[in-house]
Image (spheres, rainbow, N blue to C red):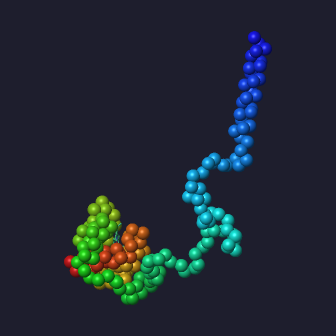
């Protein structure tokens, strides 16, 4: 009985070893087996993280040349300084046509992004101000912290403010595209006259 068992154990072990040799003996251990339409995933182009003999530093991902900007990107070459603000205030003018549609779009954007602080009519009495946030000056009656009446703020000064923010007001550059900023500004001009 015991002898029979011994043979069985030996036999099973031999089969197991043979099977594992067969299973693991493939030449390429990373092979995924049969491939269907392999050029869908083994493409000809280099991957960004692959080494690349065509470039001096041997990398595929290259730094864009200095000064490169994305297609359609609109530059605003005025620094976030008092001088940049004043200079933009004189030189920068809205490229948008004064249309009903632009003004209507500006109103919607203003109500979403600005009215929580500035209030629906730009009086500086928005909802978060009612809950204790420092109130911005009224667009029509207030004074700018950078001098002059709020109602006299020009295209460029407002564009600078939306782009960089000022004191308790943050930048809206990541929320509003340049054209959207100009639409909002059109609406702010409307509120300056209230
Ligand atoms: C979180 C509250 C808040 C939001 C939202 C906000 N502002 Fe302001 N804004 C302020 C405060 C506070 C000031 C006054 C800052 C100062 O001069 O100290 C201000 C000032 C301004 C000024 C005057 C800048 C100057 O030159 O004196 C303009 C113009 C302005 N905001 C436009 C906007 C526009 C347009 C939006 C929407 C895209 C907006 N703000 C969203 C809080 C806000």
In front: 67, or 160?
67
175 in relation to 178, above or below: above
Asked if one can make out residue 171 in the rendered structure from this viewpoint, the answer is: no
The residue furthest left is 194
Residue 16 lies, in percent from the top left, at: 72, 30
Residue 188 position in % (x across, y down): 28, 76
Q: Position of residue 7 (x, y in %)?
A: 77, 19
Q: Quadrant of residue 21?
A: top right
Q: Which quadrant: the C terminus?
A: bottom left
**Visible in this render: residue 179?**
yes
Is residue 128 or residue 57 the one in the foreground? 57
In-front residue for pair 134/28? 28
Q: Residue furthest bottom?
A: 91
Figure disc tally: 0
* Quadrant housing residue 161: bottom left
Residue 54 shown left or right of residue 168 in the figure: right
**Which residue is at 41% across, 75% downward?**
163
In the orientation shown, which residue stands out farthest toward the right? 3
Q: Residue at x 76, y 15 (%)?
A: 4
The residue that appears at 67% across and 49% down in the rendered structure is: 30
Q: Position of residue 112 (x, y in %)?
A: 30, 66
Q: Using residue 178 as the reference point, say whether residue 105 is left or right of it.
A: left
Q: Residue at x 57, y 52 (%)?
A: 36
| The image quadrant in which ligand 1 is located | bottom left
Quadrant containing the N terminus is: top right
């Amino acid at each position: 009985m015991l002898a029979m068992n011994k043979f069985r154990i030996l036999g099973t072990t031999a089969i197991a070893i043979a099977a594992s040799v067969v299973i693991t003996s493939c030449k390429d251990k990373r092979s995924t087996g049969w491939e269907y339409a392999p050029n869908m995933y083994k493409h000809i182009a280099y991957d960004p993280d692959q080494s690349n003999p065509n470039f001096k530093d041997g990398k595929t991902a290259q730094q864009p040349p200095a000064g490169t900007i994305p297609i359609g990107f609109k530059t605003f070459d005025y620094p976030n300084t008092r001088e940049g603000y004043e200079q933009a205030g004189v030189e920068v003018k809205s490229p948008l046509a004064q249309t009903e549609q632009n003004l209507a779009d500006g109103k919607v954007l203003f109500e979403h992004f600005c009215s929580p602080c500035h209030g629906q009519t730009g009086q500086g009495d928005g909802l978060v101000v009612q809950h204790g946030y420092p109130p911005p000056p009224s667009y029509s009656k207030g004074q700018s912290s950078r001098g002059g009446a709020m109602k006299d703020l020009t295209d460029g000064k407002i564009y600078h403010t939306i782009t960089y923010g000022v004191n308790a007001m943050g930048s809206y550059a990541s929320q509003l595209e340049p054209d959207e900023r100009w639409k909002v500004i059109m609406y702010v001009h409307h509120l300056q006259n209230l």
